[in-house]
Image: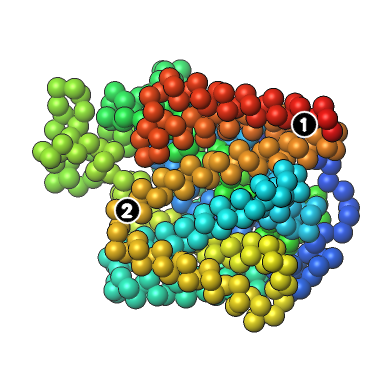
């Protein structure tokens, strides 16, 4: 528990100090914002600051800092360091600078920013890549919540239709009609759940592995985890540390802000809040898997399924390990129901159902905005919004139909999405670095995390068994060469410009 407490304090101190460093480097001023200059009562509309914060938090969070943190803690206490340092020096800086860049450029999206600072070819590639990512996220977050809801009441296809109709509403309607009203309530629910779980943790005071107990791959010895800590940990925990998905969501809020000075609490602050969520669930995961918490919260018949083998791993008779049997959503529902009873079950339902649904709705809306920017189509009229939304819905329905017919196949695709998220993070940090260098500002702020994330995504691409599947050493060497090439390219560009 000491590592958890220290990490929470570190995040708070990091926000108080380093967010001001990032703010001073960027230099917000009193210029007119897009919400005022381009007001259209659809996408560009001034919203209260607290509401923007809540929407931004829910948009970038969803289930990411919950599920990712649970699976990330399988690697052990090193997860605490990645969440804290990744969030303060990487993710929050990434969100703040990219969000402020969008604010400075009429609320434009990541692809347009990439075109401005890395060139037209990079812009075109990112338009296709981002569109694909947004529709994949949207489709994935239709079927999974539908499965859970059908287990409570109703038919699976009924819930698929209801959720998709909700997506249509969030994509088409002005941002203050659905997103502006519903998302803050869901965000409050998620925060309340996290606070409640943190209180129970402090009451229980479980004996947990600490950072100083070792930063090696605990999961390899105790849970049968086969992935290497580097780079898998840094891709598994994306939301809560560093996530490129956030750069696709921030432009929506950049179009609703009345002052640039709101950027620090909204962009940097929402990311730090997400880091707190990740810390709580990482600690709960540590309790569940490393302190035998699963034996306390699971029904006796479930506990009896497992026996400890000669290698010290708990397995079922079929050879299923703990991390194979207890998925992240199962951990959430089990812990919430055990610790908080019926009320906890409701909160868990909000966490594993409402959060992904809202994330999916935001993803579809982002896809529409990307198309609007790419083709220069104004979105004031409902007809123009429908024109751009129809192809997004069509692709989403096709992917959804494929997922229903191939439920296991989509799990493989989702691993590529996780890697793609971190690839976008690395790219966004390079975009921010080029901007800061052009403006003769302290570009090391984003360059260092950009270099690290480039190494992470390059190594993961080559070492992951679902992508290239190369041995660890060759993968590291290739990744190092790619990262060094990017650094040299930046140095050459900077000297020429």
Mark 2 and 1 residues: CB-CB less than 8 Å, in contact?
Answer: no
Q: Earlier in the sequence, mark 2 or mark 1?
A: 2
Q: Which residue is mark 2?
A: 409
In the image, residue 306 sits, relative to residue 50, either above or below, namely above
Location of residue 356 in the rendering, given as x and y in whole percent from the top left corner: 46, 58
For residue 18, say whether it is visible. Answer: no
Q: Nearer the viewer, residue 138 or 342?
A: 138
Label 2: which secondary element: helix
- Residue shown at 52% from the left, 35% from the top: 457
Rounded to the nearest angstrom, the CA distance separating label 2 from label 1 is 42 Å
Location of residue 91 in the rendering, given as x and y in whole percent from the top left corner: 61, 39
Q: Which residue is mark 1?
A: 493
- Please indicate whether residue 103 sits to the left or right of residue 312 in the image: right
Location of residue 281 in the rendering, given as x and y in whole percent from the top left corner: 44, 41
Q: Nearer the viewer, residue 161 or 313?
A: 161
- Residue shown at 79% from the left, 37% from the top: 436
Label 1: which secondary element: helix
Q: How is the image coloured?
A: rainbow
- Please indicate whether residue 28 sits to the left or right of residue 63 in the image: right
- Residue shown at 60% from the left, 41% from the top: 425
Residue farthest front in this picture: 121
Residue farthest left in this picture: 317
- Residue shown at 57% from the left, 23% from the top: 481
**Crowd band around label 2 with a 10 angstrom C-alpha radius: few (<14), some (14–19), many (20+):** few
Query: On the rendered image, what quadrant is the N terminus found in?
Result: top left
Location of residue 186 in the rendering, given as x and y in whole percent from the top left corner: 52, 61
For residue 450, say whether it is visible. Answer: yes
How many marks do you count on the picture?
2
Q: Which mark is residue 147?
A: none
- Please indicate whether residue 471 sits to the left or right of residue 319 in the image: right
Q: Nearer the viewer, residue 451 or 47?
A: 451
């Amino acid at each position: 528990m000491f590592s958890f407490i220290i990490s929470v304090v570190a995040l708070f101190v990091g926000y108080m100090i380093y967010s001001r460093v990032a703010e001073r480097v960027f230099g917000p001023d009193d210029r007119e914002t897009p919400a005022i200059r381009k007001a259209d009562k659809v996408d560009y509309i001034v919203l209260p600051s607290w509401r923007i914060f809540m929407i931004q938090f829910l948009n970038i969070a969803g289930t990411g800092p919950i599920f990712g943190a649970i699976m990330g803690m399988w690697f052990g206490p090193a997860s605490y360091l990645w969440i804290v340092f990744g969030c303060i020096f990487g993710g929050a800086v990434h969100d703040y600078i990219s969000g402020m860049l969008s604010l400075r450029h009429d609320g434009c999206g990541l692809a347009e920013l990439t075109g401005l600072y890395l060139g037209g070819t990079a812009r075109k590639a990112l338009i296709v890549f981002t569109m694909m990512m947004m529709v994949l996220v949207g489709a994935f977050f239709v079927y999974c919540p539908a499965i859970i809801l059908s287990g409570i009441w109703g038919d699976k296809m009924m819930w698929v239709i209801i959720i998709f109709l909700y997506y249509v509403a969030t994509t088409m309607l002005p941002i203050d009609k659905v997103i502006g009203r519903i998302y803050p309530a869901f965000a409050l629910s998620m925060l309340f759940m996290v606070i409640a779980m943190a209180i129970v943790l402090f009451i229980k005071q479980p004996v947990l592995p600490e950072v100083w107990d070792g930063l090696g791959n605990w999961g390899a010895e105790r849970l049968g985890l086969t992935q290497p800590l580097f780079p898998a940990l840094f891709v598994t925990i994306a939301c809560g540390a560093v996530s490129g998905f956030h750069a696709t969501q921030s432009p929506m809020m950049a179009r609703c802000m009345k002052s640039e000075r709101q950027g620090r609490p909204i962009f940097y602050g929402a990311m730090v809040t997400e880091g707190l969520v990740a810390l709580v669930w990482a600690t709960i995961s540590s309790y569940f898997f490393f302190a035998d918490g699963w034996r306390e919260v699971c029904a006796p018949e479930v506990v009896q399924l497992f026996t400890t083998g000669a290698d010290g791993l708990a397995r079922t008779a079929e050879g299923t390990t703990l991390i194979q049997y207890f998925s992240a959503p199962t951990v959430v529902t089990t812990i919430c129901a055990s610790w908080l009873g019926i009320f906890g079950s409701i909160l868990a339902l909000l966490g594993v159902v409402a959060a992904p649904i809202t994330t999916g709705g935001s993803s579809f809306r982002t896809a529409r905005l990307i198309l609007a920017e790419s083709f220069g189509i104004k979105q004031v009229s409902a007809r123009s919004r429908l024109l751009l939304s129809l192809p997004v819905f069509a692709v989403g329905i096709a992917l959804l139909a494929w997922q229903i017919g191939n439920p296991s196949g989509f799990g493989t695709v989702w691993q590529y999405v996780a890697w793609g998220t971190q690839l976008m993070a690395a790219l966004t940090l390079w975009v921010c670095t080029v901007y800061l260098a052009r403006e003769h500002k302290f570009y090391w702020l984003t360059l260092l995390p950009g270099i690290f994330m480039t190494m992470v995504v390059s190594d993961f691409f080559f070492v992951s068994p679902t992508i290239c599947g190369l041995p660890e050493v060759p993968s590291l060497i290739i990744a190092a060469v790619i990262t060094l090439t990017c650094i040299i390219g930046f140095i050459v560009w900077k000297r020429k410009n």
